[in-house]
Image (tube, rainbow, N blue to C red):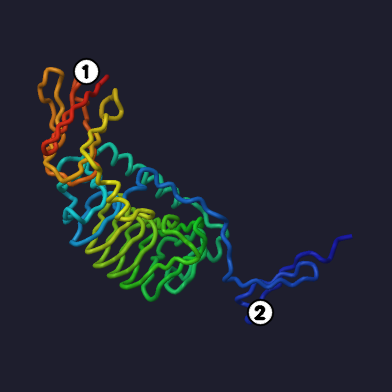
């Protein structure tokens, strides 16, 4: 005989619109629809973009004075499209595709190509995930999430729904291991003076905003998490970010702003980047074909010359000839137009001279 005490849905009346009612056996369960728990998420793997505070495609511009804790990179646009940074504004390394960047920048075209590729992978990973359950995680607030408190989960905003946090703060509440992913098909806007607040131990390192077009952060706003935008990211005067600004094809523009990679503190990075002595590392890889990376450290700002010579002492390439700030630096020698053989690379920094050999095998 069929058991009559099976689960039966009840159609809610108007007075029950905010409740989900189920009869299971003789027990009536009433659940608020605003309550939802998402399945745990894995964080987005940022790959080699993890150390970048700013990574852009066409332009990185700054109106001083800003404070950037983390690396800056620009590709495929040339280093000349990194503008407005003074010598003390960046605690990290500025990477460029060529030698036209700001003083102290490091040409690293191959590394930047890898980083941009990793950004594409991370962006696509965040974009294709599916929110479970879908209900309250699909277009919450019709895109206006100011004033909401959001538990961890994957929030999806569909095409035509611009995400705005303009009238009041939004709170993300969860544990230190919880993950938030925001899939935004259109734009993201954080209003002037608006804060993203973390509660319950939530960490900026576990918050990811995948933006289909562009993101804008208002004056004196406070933002948490990594923005991965297809186009551009702009920060107005005094905006503060604990996270990363990663723009695939467009520009990142900032104005007297602060951007800090999660987990990095300026004092810790200073200590890391200010060695006690000059040091020239062995190139890697070695032997190599066709390019290799040469790294070195400077305890003080110095006039730096880094050259390549053949075994007869003939200079064949000048990789660096500029004043560079104290800290860690690296550059890439692309030797695709040179014959196989053993070469010498020579670092002159102030009165210090270091020499090492490298081997090109084709």
Residue at point 54% right, 66% down? 136
Query: How many numbered marks have been drawn onto this rendered protein structure?
Result: 2
Rendered position, 207 above or below 193: above
The tag earlier along the polypeptide, 2 or 1, is 2
Q: Tell which residue pokes out farthest to the front in this image.
A: 276
Q: Is residue 187 visible?
A: yes
Residue at point 20% right, 58% down? 62
The residue closer to the viewer here, 184 or 261, is 261
Which residue is denoted by mark 1 in the rendering?
341
Q: Secondary structure at mark 2?
A: loop
Which residue is denoted by mark 2 in the rendering?
13
- In the visual, does 222 lie left or right of 31? left
Q: Marks 2/1: CA distance? A: 83 Å
Q: Is residue 247 visible?
A: no
Q: Residues within 10 Å of mark 1 (few under 14, many from 20)?
A: few
Residue at point 32% right, 44% down? 116
């Amino acid at each position: 005989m069929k058991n009559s005490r099976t689960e039966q849905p009840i159609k809610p009346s108007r007075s029950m619109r905010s409740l989900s009612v189920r009869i299971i056996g003789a027990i009536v369960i009433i659940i608020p629809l605003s309550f939802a728990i998402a399945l745990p998420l894995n964080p987005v793997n940022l790959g080699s973009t993890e150390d970048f505070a700013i990574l852009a495609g066409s332009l990185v511009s700054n109106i001083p004075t800003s404070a950037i804790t983390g690396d800056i990179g620009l590709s495929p646009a040339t280093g000349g499209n990194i503008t407005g940074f003074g010598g003390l504004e960046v605690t990290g390394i500025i990477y460029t595709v060529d030698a036209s960047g700001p003083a102290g920048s490091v040409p690293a075209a191959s590394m930047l190509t890898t980083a941009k590729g990793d950004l594409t992978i991370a962006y696509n990973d965040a974009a294709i995930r599916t929110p479970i359950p879908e209900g309250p995680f699909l277009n919450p607030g019709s895109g206006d999430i100011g004033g909401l408190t959001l538990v961890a989960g994957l929030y999806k905003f569909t095409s035509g729904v611009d995400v705005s946090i303009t009238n009041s703060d939004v709170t993300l509440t969860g544990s230190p291991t919880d993950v938030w992913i925001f899939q935004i098909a259109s734009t993201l806007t954080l209003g002037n003076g608006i804060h993203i607040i973390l509660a319950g131990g939530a960490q900026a390192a576990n918050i990811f905003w995948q933006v289909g077009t562009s993101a804008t952060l208002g004056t004196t706003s406070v933002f948490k998490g990594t923005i991965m935008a297809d186009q551009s990211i702009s920060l107005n005067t005094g905006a503060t970010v604990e996270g990363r600004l990663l723009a695939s094809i467009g520009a990142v523009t900032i104005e007297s702003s602060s951007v800090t990679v999660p987990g990095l503190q300026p004092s810790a990075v200073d200590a890391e980047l200010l060695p006690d002595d000059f040091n020239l590392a062995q190139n890697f890889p070695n032997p190599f074909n066709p390019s290799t990376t040469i790294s070195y450290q400077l305890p003080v700002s110095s006039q730096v010359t880094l050259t390549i010579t053949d075994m007869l002492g003939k200079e064949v390439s000048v990789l660096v000839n500029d004043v560079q700030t104290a800290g860690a630096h690296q550059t890439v020698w692309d030797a695709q137009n040179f014959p196989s053989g053993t070469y010498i690379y020579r670092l002159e920094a102030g009165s210090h001279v270091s020499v090492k050999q490298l081997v090109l095998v084709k």
